[in-house]
Amino acid sequence: MSTKGPDGTGSSTGGFSAEERAALEARAAELTKERSRGRGNRAAADELDVLAKVRDMEPADRAVAERIHAIVTESAPELAPKLWYGQPAYARRGKVVCFFRSGRADQERYSTFGFTPEADLDDDIGLWPTSYAVTDLGERAARTIATLVKKAVG
């Protein structure tokens, strides 16, 4: 039986929640698709997959995801868009550096923009950002994301 865990995240006492299973299934499908694509067309096809995923999002998440896609691809053109656990992500040499998670898809009240350990965000105080809740992307938030993405790729 699947229930919300004590932290309210949808953790399950009897295994994975429906959302977690869906993410795992999406990731398995992504890996299968990656293996079947030739190297030459993979980057273009991956970006089309990301854009299709964004297009299918609820309007509020779509607006944020479209803006994040534009910010990331402009700030770090060396990052390649790809799907990661069924959501838009941006990778360097095949390894995801940053990602967007739809709040509605995750049944959360906000979407998330985050960074993986591949991001070069470490600082000298031992504390750096790994993810942000995103409900709207005003100009100040957009500049912050652009700055973080540039730093993440070095």
Image (spheres, grey):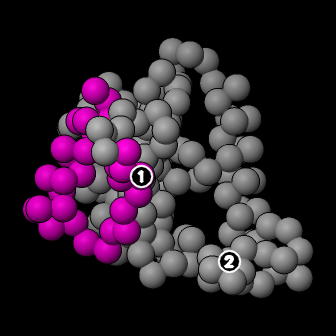
Seen from the viewer's position, the closer of residues 154 and 87 is: 154
Identify whether 114 is placed above or below 148. below
Pointer 2 residue:
10
Q: Quadrant of residue 61?
A: bottom left
Q: Residue at x 61, y 18 (%)?
A: 38
Q: Residue at x 37, y 68 (%)?
A: 133
On the picture, is 129 further left or further right than 28?
left
Q: Residue at x 48, y 60 (%)?
A: 101
Camera sees residue 24: yes
Image coords of residue 43 (percent x, y)? 46, 27
Q: Quadrant of the N terminus?
A: bottom right
Q: Are marks 2 and 1 in contact (CB under 8 Å)?
A: no
Q: Quadrant of residue 150?
A: top left
Image coords of residue 33 (percent x, y)? 68, 35
**Residue type, numbered disc 1:** Thr
Image coords of residue 26 (percent x, y)? 68, 52
Identify whether 29 is placed above or below 4. above
Q: For mark 2, give the secondary structure.
A: loop
Image coords of residue 153 (percent x, y)? 32, 30
Pointer 1 residue:
130
Mark 2 → mark 1, Cα distance in angstroms: 21 Å
Magenta stretch in the rendered image: 126-154
The single residue placed furthest to the left in the displayed view is 139
Q: For mark 1, give the secondary structure.
A: loop
The tally of labels here is 2
Seen from the viewer's position, the closer of residues 73 and 56 is: 73
- The magenta stretch spans residue 4: no
Give the numbered dot on residue 46: none
Seen from the viewer's position, the closer of residues 136 and 145 is: 145
Seen from the viewer's position, the closer of residues 130 and 101 is: 130
Residue neighbourhood size for the residue with mark 2, other residues' Cα within 10 Å, grouped as few (<14), some (14–19), many (≥20): some
